[in-house]
Amino acid sequence: MVIQPSNTPLLEWAGDSLAIGLFEDAVELTGELATLNEKFGGILKELIAEEEFTGKANSTISTRLAAGSQVRKVILVGLGKPDALKLDNIRRAVAAVARVAKKQKSKTLGFSFPLWNNDPAATAQAMAEGVQLALYQDNRFKSEPEDKGLQIESVDFLGFDGQEAALNRANQIVSGVILARQLVAAPANAVTPITLAETAQAIAKDHGLQLEILEREDCEKLGMGAFLGVAQASDLPPKFIHLTYKPTGTPKKKLAIIGKGLTFDSGGLNIKGAGSGIETMKIDMGGAAATLGAAKAIAQLQPEEVEVHFISAATENMISGHAMHPGDILKASNGKTIEVNNTDAEGRLTLADALVFADKLGLDAIVDLATLTGANVIALGDDIAGLFTPDDAVASQLEKAAEIAGEKIWRMPMEEKYFEGLKSGIADMKNTGPRPGGAITAALFLKQFVKDTAWAHLDIAGPVWTDKENGYNGAGATGYGVRTLVNWVLSSQ
Ligand code: BES
Ligand code: MN
Ligand code: ZN
């Protein structure tokens, strides 16, 4: 599928489906649209009246034009109220159109959309993201592709002449989101610590990043007892992945992105029971997927003044005769001891050593993303990630980055008093506190492993996956986090 800016005037565009974005309560056609309506024999006006189209966000109506017309179908899409227009409304509206056009078996699709914030570059980028993210279909595990037959071949953004750079940016970012979706959607017998490391290697090779993989012995030397405790029951070797993007110029900022990389979470000996969603626990590397997706995007975008470290302590949480016993005491690489009162709170153990590693790199900020707790899903639901940080500046950077991305985050309290729930009689701390406030105690646990660097944690257990189609996300893996991370890195220069 080719997406291109076009300087063809709206009245002259010819193709299968022509999509027109209209604001709520402003669906009377004026100017060029009035002329287009006349040209189409008044069909646009009739369509709006007949279907009682009001321009409600993401609502679509469509009709066929006469055989032999320059346009086969016209699609009207609502954008909501003009003063409430967000970049993400553009993505969602474009996605709604793309799905309709696909059903219409259109090969060519034209868009006539208003500008968001008078910003043609941001608008074109969001439109290109929306189309591609909505039309992406994962056929890797089907013997026959589900959507064979006609595909949209070319997409024209009318009036967006000169926005090639914005479209190129969108493609680079989308390639990172798709990678993250593919990694999350693939089952645990396809995405393993080994293949995650191979994926990191492919990114390094294709896009010129530095790569360091720490094997089990390397991790032992660094004293990563928390990470290795989790890894010890798996038949697969753990891989500690460290990719680095170095800009051509001298970096003004040095950042790290850390992703929880549990390619499967059985719970360990505190095994996940029936109804716990154990069969969905391939998604437990969603943080690592977002990290690698962001690496792929950043490596192509090549920001000039920021260095970024992409890190994941990848393993599985399994059971075997050499599994951690509930109650075992582990020592993390900062010397702190942890009583593992629940082997299913494994993500924080792997992150502990990853955070210590990143903290020693002398960076300006660290963000970790993790499918860390069911408690966060209970608190914020499926669509919203929890943001935990003691640092107001990083919090507001991430909130802005997420807002532009249309990825929802909500700041949660780091209530220090709740650390009492992690007090251990025998070690420095337990890995699991009481059920109430479980996402908060998880964040407080992580905080013990960051000493010198500004740090934020995103609990993405909810939004990595969607059971139903939602905006530009099809049912399944969303690639959540990649676009927020990219925006955060680009805004940090
Ligand atoms: N990977 C899970 C969290 C999770 C739950 C991710 C649902 C995605 C969807 C994590 O390792 C876990 O098992 N957390 C436990 C922690 C508890 C033992 C303190 C949980 O949330 O129940
Ligand atoms: Mn677990
Ligand atoms: Zn887990």
Image: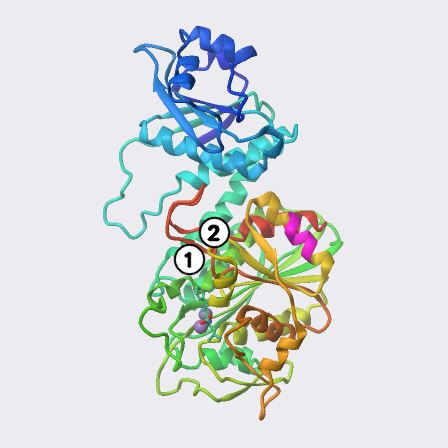
Q: Residues within 10 Å of mark 1 (few under 14, many from 20)?
A: many
- Residue 103, quarter of the rendered image: top left
Q: Nearer the viewer, residue 308 or 73?
A: 73
**Above or below, 37 relative to 244:** above
Q: Amino acid at mark 1?
A: Val
**What residue sits right under mark 2 in the picture?**
479
The residue at 70%/57% (across/down) is 394
Our reading of the magenta stretch's main secondary structure is helix
Residue 132 x %, y %? 45, 38
Q: Is mark 2 within 8 Å of ligand 1?
A: no
**Above or below, 117 relative to 474:** above
Residue 221 x %, y %? 58, 82
Residue 141 x %, y %? 29, 53
The magenta span reads: 395-400
For the question of whether residue 315 can be seen, the reply is: no
Viewed as shown, does residue 96 lie left or right of 396?
A: left
The residue at 54%/11% (across/down) is 32
**Above or below, 306 relative to 461:** above
The residue at 54%/80% (across/down) is 431
Q: Amino acid at mark 2?
A: Gly
Is label 1 in contact with label 2 (beta carbons under 8 Å)? Answer: yes
**Above or below, 35 relative to 450:** above
**What residue sits right under mark 1 in the picture?**
184
Look at the image and say whether residue 425 sits in the magenta stretch.
no
- Residue 367, quarter of the rendered image: bottom right
Viewed as shown, does residue 105 lie left or right of 239?
A: left
Tell me how far mark 1 sits from mark 2, CA to CA: 8 Å
Residue 437 x %, y %? 55, 71
Residue at far bottom of view:
426
